[in-house]
Amino acid sequence: MRRRKGRRAKSMVVKRTVTIAGHKTSVSLEDAFWQSLKEIASERDMTRSELIAAIDSERQHGNLSSVIRLFVLDFYQQQIPVSKRAAPDISALAPTKPRSSARSRRAGRSRRRAPDTIKT
C-alpha cells in the first residue's frame, strides 16, 4: 500500500465472508462491486449471498471474485441499448508491427499439384 503523508492509504478492496452451498468462503471485491451486488440482488428479490451462489454455480473457470466482477459488468452493460454501446478499445492489445514467420510466408504461396493420373 502507498503511504500518504505518513499514513497508510486505505485499500479499496473489501473482504467479506459469504456462504455458498453451506460452506463459508471469503470474497475480496472493491466496495463499488459489493454495492452493485446488493442492488442487483435486491432487484431480483434475492440476498447478496444467494446471488453470489447463483453466480458461482454458473462459473466455468477463474476465481470467484473475477467472475463476480464480470457478472456485474455484464449486468450494467445490458442496461445500455446495443446501438449506444461503444466497441471496446483493443488497440493497445494489437501488435504495432505484424510478425512475419516462415509459416505465414509459406501459407501465402500457392501449392499447385499436378493432377493425379490413373493408368488403366
Image (spheres, rainbow, N blue to C red):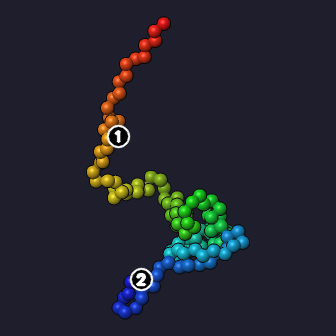
- Identity, as a three-letter code, of the amino acid under mark 2: Met
* Between discs 2 and 1, the one toward the N terminus: 2
Q: Is 8 drawn above or below residue 76 in the view shown?
A: below
Q: Answer few, some or many: residues within 10 Å of disc 1's Cα (few below 14, many 20 plus, some between 14 and 19).
A: few
* Residue occupying the point 52% across, 58% down: 78
Residue 48 visible to the viewer: yes
The extreme bottom residue here reads: 6
User: Dividing the picture into quarters, in which one does residue 43 lie?
Assistant: bottom right
* Residue occupying the point 44% across, 56% down: 85
**Where residue 29 sits: x, y (%)?**
53, 74
User: Dividing the picture into quarters, in which one does residue 52 lie?
Assistant: bottom right
- Identity, as a three-letter code, of the amino acid under mark 1: Arg
Q: Answer few, some or many: residues within 10 Å of disc 2's Cα (few below 14, many 20 plus, some between 14 and 19).
A: few
Residue beneath label 1, please? 103
Mark 1 lies on a secondary structure that is: helix
Closer mark to the observer between disc 2 and disc 1:
1
* Residue occupying the point 38% across, 83% down: 2
